[in-house]
Image (cartoon, rainbow, N blue to C red):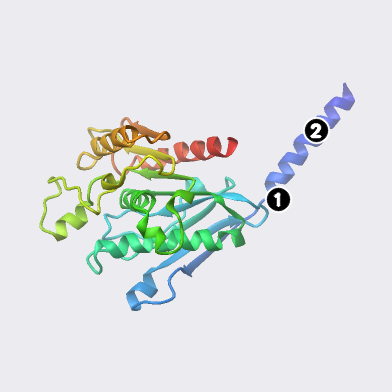
Amino acid sequence: MRNVLFLLFLYVGGLLYAQQAVTYKQVSDISYRQTGDEYALGRCKLDVYYSEDKKDCPVVVWFHGGGLTGGGKFIPQELKDCGLVVVAVNYRLIPKVDISKCIDDAAAAVAWTFREIAKFGGDTTKLYVSGHSAGGYLTNMVGLDKHWLQKYGVDADQIAGLIPFSGQAISHFAYREQKGISPLQATIDEYAPLFYVRPDAPPMILITGDRELELYGRYEENAYFWRMLKLVGHQNTHLYELDGYDHGAMAAPSFYILKKFIEKQQAK
């Protein structure tokens, strides 16, 4: 019995030492564009958060929110110290550019990640794209409309999963505002993720806040998005509504769903 307890002590001690030995590092303001005007070169940068002790890690490309008109890159606290490589992206903003530049920047950043992330211990076969609000919209667009990533030599179907947090499924309200369209006038055109529903898209986890507290009917947008993906034959789409959480507050608990989804995917 004493020998068993001693071996158990050594095993637990070894696990604790291994956990303590893992260190994380952040490299900031890496340019993912090498050409362009002053605004593009200054804005198109990303941060990488990674472990110096791990290899072949799952990767999350994270797009911040801010209505496509504001906000800045950050590494979400909920994604730190949990075995993930995290890429936090800045992109150009409306009204300094039109919406196509916002989406193109998102695609360029994802393409950069596919090319470079192995240097930071990331595995490109485990690359997930996520973001909150405007970031969720960009996630949807680069994952569903394949032409954005094709421009950079990447097939969107290489993405292991799309996890938008309260992302727009119709055309983004900032884009509609530029065209003089009310935020409450629904529009579906080439800048609507709904326009590109297809059965062969990457796995999708759609998360929103409480339908009574969300922004501009965001839950109903995502519920219709989910239904249309199902109807065209997409086999791996899931919809979560977080009761009691408004548009801003829903982000924090959504990271639990994101991490559990990645764990499940990696276990397959």
Res 43 quadrant in image: bottom left
Q: What residue type is labelled 2?
A: Phe
- Rendering coords of residue 221 (x, y %): 24, 39
Give 228 or 178, whichever is nearer the viewer: 228
User: Few, some or many C-alpha atoms within 10 Å of disc 2 (few <14, some 14-19, many ≥20)?
Assistant: few
Side of 123 relative to 173 (left or right) = right
- At a point 40% along the width and 77% down the height, the residue shown is 35
Q: To which residue does mark 1 refer?
A: 21
Q: Residue at x 47, y 68 (%)?
A: 29
State the mark number for residue 124.
none
**Which secondary structure, mark 2?**
helix
The reply to whether residue 202 is in sight is yes
First-in-chain label (1 vs 2)? 2
Q: Label 1: few (<14), some or many (≥20) within 10 Å?
A: few
Location of mark 2 (residue): 9
The amino acid on which the numbered mark 1 sits, given as a three-letter code, is: Ala
Most extreme residue toward the top is: 1
Relative image position of residue 137 (x, y in whole percent): 31, 50
Q: Can residue 245 be seen in this view?
A: no
Quadrant of image for the C terminus: top right
